[in-house]
Image (cartoon, rainbow, N blue to C red):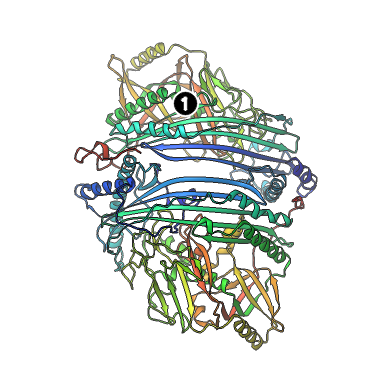
Amino acid sequence: MNAELERTLPVLGKAEPPAYFISYTVTEGQHATVTGSNGALLDSSQALTRWLQAEVRVGSYDLDNTHKIGGTQPAFQPSPGAQVPIENDAAVLQRAIWMETDRQYRAAAEALIKIKTSKEVQVQSAEEHAPDFSREKPEVSIGPHASIQLDRHPWEEKVRKYTAYFRQSADVLNSIVTFTAQADNQYQVNSEGSKLQFGQVRFRLELFIQGKAPDGMDIDRYYNFDWTDPNQPPTDDAVMAAEGTMRHELESLVKAPLVEPFAGPTLLTGRAAAVFFHEVFGHRDEGFRQKDMNEGQTFARKVGEPIMPSFISIVDDPTKKTLGNDVLLGSYPFDDEGVPSERVTLVDHGVLKGFEMSRQALIDFPVSNGHGRRQIGAEPVSRQGNLIVESSHAVSNAELRRMFIEEIKKQGKPFGLLIDDIAGGFTFTGRGQPQAFQVQPLVVYKVYTDGRPDELVRGVDIVGTPLLSLTKIVATGDKPEVFNGYCGAESGSVPVAAAAPEMLISEMEVQKKESSSDAPPILPHPFHDKQAPKPQGDHQ
Amino acid sequence: MKRGRSLCAAALAIIAAVILVPVARAQQKSDATDRTLQAMHDELDRSKTRMQIPGLEKPYFIEYRLLDLDVRTITASFGALVSSTTSHNRFMDVNIRVGSYNLDNSNFISGEQFQGFLGSAGQVGVDGDYESLRQDLWLATDQAYKSALDSLARKQGFLRSLSKPPDVADFSQEKPLQRIEPKAVPDWSNRDWEQEAKQASQVLRAYPDLYGNRITYTLVYETYYIMNTEGTEVRTGRSLAAIEAGMETQAPDGVPMHHFYTAYAIHPVDLPSATEVAHQLDTRGKELIAMRTAEPMPAYGGPVLFESRAAAELLAEMLGASVSGSRPPVSMVPMYDQIMESRGGRSEWLGRLNSRVLPAGTSLADDPSAKDAQGRPLPGSYSVDDEGVLPQAVTLVDNGTLKDLLMSRRPGQDFTQSNGHGRALFLGDPHAESSNLFFKSANGVSPDDLKKKFLDECKKDGRQWCLLVRELDNPVIGDIHDEGEVQDMVAGASSGERVPLEVYRVNVADGSEEPLRPGHLLSMDLRLLREVSGIGNDPTLFAYEQSQTLGVQGTALAAFGASADGLPSTVTAPSLLFEDVEGREARGEMRRLPLVPPPPMQ
């Protein structure tokens, strides 16, 4: 990589237009997957790949080929990269880098000409005067090579067992359990002098079941375990306990009544609050969105202003590996632009302080804070790592529930809503779309003030304005809960975590979700079919 | 069950999904030890008797298909291993028809369709486990039935709006078939495939002007199950082994260029040795480097000689949709017809039964049951087609006259029964496709005589040189880093534009050959075959993968395939001489040459 960089720099640096920045990244991925469904093994495989991405920037830090003009599509369409040998054959790798560099340089040079032409005729937003690429200190760090030694066989047995359990329920129509193990190593060099090698190991177990309510509404339950120490997988007891809860929730939801439209006090459990903040706040606080004229620029001009109650602070900290006993999935030593990860304060006591930044600079935020991330094949943009919501008005969860009941009474509502689980939906941050968010609550209870037990309801959709709901937080619990997941956005899917305590919101508005046109299966589950003799299957 | 995906995506997702050649000869009526057959049987039975939404029609036909797939894929470049994977997966597809054989939910393309929560196709367990398969089939059957009812309602509504609805039936009635062949058992351990891929591609290090190259070995074993409510119960084992290599460079004036090599066999053990592959790659490397600096093929009009291999490749492209006798679907989407048209999906032989379509004395036949030709096994062969129908040899053209067409269970205006040519990629919709095509002539002359005739025609035209084509291009395999060139090259195939790869200028005075950089030959459609002015007696077998990329199957583009998205097929044909063909220089976009010279290779 270095040899090719040394050969290329003097030539492309003097070309017209000149390349001012070149970087090469090879990502080596050792991935194993074991998937089971309905009691049988679906897939068990392992692969080793190396993927090369070359980046060539022409022009200057202030104005280069990645510059976005007004609302137009970026002129620069980079190549996703190329698969390179998994063996250490320097000559073959060097040739692949050479081809990829040429491809990138051609595309970049073409884009810069288009940008320079259209820049003269287009309206400029303030942030378009910010540099296209931040100046950063070169980093040299050679870490150990990460790898996994894995026998997939025990996991093949486990996924069979974990999915076979769900056959006991006539309401669980389909189940999928997936175990993944991955060791990723990144090798990166750039023309500024950075030389990096770092690796990470991740393990994950995902449980997913599907059911249907009598009106055809899809009822899905999902749970995941994440760990980084190969010797600390979840115990069978822990998995079976999670499965028991999932099954119980699914069976209850299938029978639960539909929610009616409601606006009033709402309590979010920690996991639900974490997902809520990731979607509603975290995505809108990504630096690159403040620059794009198509985006609502929700926070662009709000730095220094209060945007939520003064007891709430939010940081994004990819340097943190665990919170309590939980692994944080959005941890990494360097981001995908080779910048060391940093803990960054986004909100301090309710006041907006900053953004998750990549090397795409803003006028008031000229440098990266190590949040430039991407999936292999995509271009890095600013993304979340570990979003952590902290509170200085924290009470015990029991006290928070008491305050919740009080709030319901105060507002004269018949009940309040307790949201126990929420699916990260799709946040509409584009200007052309309504400023509403669609996070999908999955497990929701009506909480009454007269001591009646909580009542499960289904089909809940949240409606409303995100910024507004952030201002309506009344108080929080004192135990942060972690949600780990893979977040999809402009630069692909990246591992993230969000952590938040329970949260009481004075008003949230919900509506009834549209139902599916696909009714429940016509025939009963083959193992719960009373009309037919029990199938005579045997296990092998 | 893992969520059903679009068949196109499914085809791409799995490295190779191929319809292959029979592994086994032994066969029986049933196999009591096969839990897969039993689960399919029991769930089919339950569905047949009880699947019905009150007040709506019952299915008149239910079909279960299951594909058990073992795939080994190895890729190397310049002697270094790029990837090496082994996978074992199983997939199912449930097909339900409501209505009647005459008019059902099939053969209809509408903008919308039923959106179920799982779909009627998907990945299922590899354990041969009875319970899980019944559960998966149960859900897929449910989804297929709802989807079929939805389609039939839409179709009936649309047909009422047509002044002249099609009068051809939707589905043919066939005799049920019970045939249980042994399962395919993977055996790829007898050679070190990683080592062979590395060794073979190592020779290309000797060509510093080659920008990139890639060689992929794909070894596939599959067991295919099909069962339906008419009583068909089939299990068949198949295998395919493929070597596919591409290499690329750029001419000094900036035109991107490539070359390719393929070898197909039924069993991995029959693939050429690493030494032989290395030799072949070396030859092609040399040819590509020579083409790089060769003069571009100029605008041309005159005689062109297609040597036998190029002639077979030409037929594979030209015959495309014309060999199929199936009816087209009814489409609510006007785009569909335009897309099929632009890809060469319209039969040139429609309504031409009993007319002359080829020169007198020539014949065209397709035989999926043929085991070998010229001592070589035929990768296009199969023992049962993908609809569970036994394949028949079909003589399409006899003494120049069109007599028959290839049929799946989708009827057509001239023929209503299947002749066992329903072929599908990866549980996709079966289409009537060729398998092993044989073009024969009673009047073939020796290659020397044909070349003499060629040169005589040139002289008669007063030409100093003429064009000879030795090989046609397959850009899908040759072009590794496609930057739009493939689209450019295949775009003209439907209008009869053919892209030679190896084309020579033959000096009329002394018969000497000089390589040219490839251009395009124009208007080479089936009509031109009637005017062929000379035929050799040198039949050559060309094995290839008929592309099944969505929307391309059965079109002129189908010849541009690779094992990841194709059906193994062969065309056997002799050299062909055409009196008057026009050609032009390639109009590909020239790219600037890399500013940095290539790095050293050693």
- Of B234 and A100, nearer the camera is B234
Tell me where residue B429 appears, x and y as whole percent.
Answer: 39, 57
Q: Which residue is mark 1?
A: A468
Left or right: residue B228 compared with residue A122: left
Disc 1 residue type (three-letter): Leu
Closer to the camera in the image, A251 or B388: B388
Given residues A230 and A517, the one toward you in this image is A230
Above or below: residue B431 compared with residue A346 = below
Give the position of the N terminus of chain A as an image quadrant.
Answer: top right
Would residue A68 be visible to someone looking at this image? Answer: no
Residue B448 lies, in percent from the top left, at 62, 82
**At numbered mark 1, what does the secondary structure look like: helix, strand or loop?**
helix
In the image, is residue B329 above or below residue A200? below
Chain ID at mark 1: A
A112 vs A172, nearest the viewer: A172
Number of numbered markers: 1
- Within 10 Å of the Cα at label 1, are there few (<14), some (14-19), or many (20+) other Cα atoms? few
Residue B459, x across and y down, in percent: 66, 87
What is the quadrant of residue B340 in the picture? bottom left
State which quarter of the image contains the C terminus of chain A.
top left
Going 71% across and 60% down the picture, which residue do you hit?
Answer: B254
In the displayed image of the protein, which residue is found farthest to the bottom? B460
Establish if A348 lies above or below B440: above
Location of residue B372 with respect to B551 vertically, above or below: below
In the displayed structure image, the side of residue B153 where residue B430 appears, left or right: right
Q: Residue at x 37, y 33 (%)?
A: A163
Q: Position of residue A224 (x, y in %)?
A: 45, 29
Query: Does the image show residue A61?
Result: yes
